[in-house]
Image: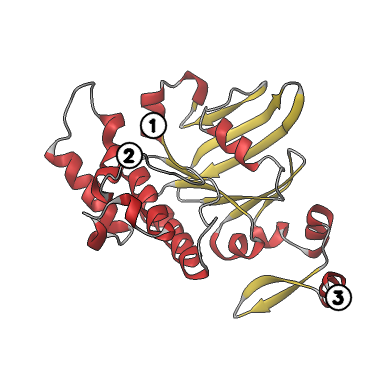
Amino acid sequence: MEVVRINDLFFSYNGDFTIEGVTISVGKGEVVSLLGPNGSGKTTLIKCINALLVPKHGKVIVAGRDVMNYSRTDLAKMIGYVPQSHEPSFPFTVSDVVLMGRVAHLDIFQQPSRSDYAKADAAIKTVGLERLRDKPYTQISGGERQLALIARALAQEPLVLILDEPTAHLDFKNQIQTLQIIRKLSRDRDIAVILSLHDPNHALLFTDKTALMNGGRVVAFDEPGKVINRDNIARIYGIDVDVVSHRGHALIMPSIASNACLR
């Protein structure tokens, strides 16, 4: 079942096109990665999907409705957004940060109910942060902070989860743990997930489809194994790679020729 449909999307900053003719779709329980070099338009596309930017042309449809026709409150019930980084101005506890995900479901001046607290606690448990529930958000690691933001988004009970470079600034272990949790959430809760990535291997291992972006365009959109190949990587990143198979998974490695050029 299709949850997100992006139709012929154009967006420009001061007349310079950043997103040109993007068309992709995301189904329920599906993880779609946006992959491409810096400046390829991944973050701009994410902001258009979340109605933080207004496209010049085209539409983003979520649950059958143009995102520009949602109120911010109603859109927050549809889309959970995890930014690339978040620096809090106050040392809220992890529990309080996650509880903020329930704001979209509350009327103005309404206090969170017992049900809201329960849903926040369930989200904390889902990402494995129970032991840090009462810890100040400012005093936990980068990986734990990222999981807390994912829990906050889950507390919104969204149909769509959008993550802007969720593995940025994380060590190897936390990168893998975060991506495993995201993939499991999409399956267990039938959430449509869109996330931007830098590492082609992460897309190959953890996503169902990949939109390969360059110069504001989607140059290929399909299953990761069909999109991430030697020709496309050379064309987009300007580097020679080898595609190897390990335990049934395709992986990308810089070729010997490329390594020689880097010495």
Residue 259 placement: quadrant: bottom right
> Disc 3 on helix, strand or loop?
helix
Residue for badge 2 = 156
Q: Measured from the top left, where is residue 200 in percent x and y?
A: 66, 61
User: Where's residue 146, x and y in %?
Assistant: 42, 53
Image quarter hosting the C terminus = bottom right
Q: Marks 3 and 2, Cα distance to the nearest angstrom?
A: 49 Å
N-terminal label among 3 and 2: 2
Q: Secondary structure at mark 1?
A: helix
The residue pinned by badge 3 equals 260
- Look at the numbered discs 2 and 1 and tell me whether their residues touch, using CB distance below 8 Å: yes
The amino acid pointed to by label 1 is: Ala
Q: Is residue 229 left or right of residue 194?
A: right
Q: Secondary structure at mark 2?
A: loop
Mark 3 burial class by Cα count in 10 Å: few <14, some 14-19, many 20+: few
Residue under numbered circle 1: 76
Residue 143 bears which disc, if any?
none
Q: Nearer the viewer, mark 3 or mark 1?
A: 3
